[in-house]
Image: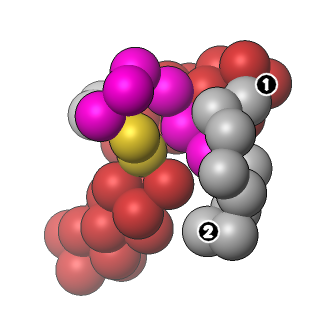
Amino acid sequence: MPEPIRARCLDFIDTLWSAEGGFHGHWAADHLDAEYTFYGLLALGHLSV
């Protein structure tokens, strides 16, 4: 994956991360979601390769 696209993907994933230890499903969500935390971690792992 080209670096500019990878960087934009990581920036997007970072906007959904919470310091509470999980990911939100979208920007307006107030609670953390286990399903989206799984997706977020999967995306981070995929982008690290």
The number of numbered badges drawn on the structure is: 2
Residue at horizontal 72 percent and vertical 19 percent from the top: 34
Which quadrant is the C terminus positioned in? top left
By secondary structure, the bulk of the magenta-drawn segment is best described as loop
Circle 2 residue = 27
- 2 and 5: which is toward the camera: 5
Residue occupying the far front of the picture: 30
Is residue 37 left or right of 9 when viewed as pictured? right
Residue 8, image quadrant: bottom left
Indicate the secondary structure of the residue bearing disc 2.
loop
The amino acid type, in three-letter code, at marker 2 is Trp
Q: Position of residue 38 (x, y in %)?
A: 65, 21
Is residue 1 inside the magenta stretch? no
Circle 1 residue = 35
Q: Position of residue 1 (x, y in %)?
A: 37, 61
Q: Position of residue 40 (x, y in %)?
A: 55, 36
Q: Residues within 10 Å of mark 2 (few under 14, many from 20)?
A: few
Residue at horizontal 79 percent and vertical 24 percent from the top: 35
Residue 20, image quadrant: top left
In this rendering, is residue 34 above or below 47?
above
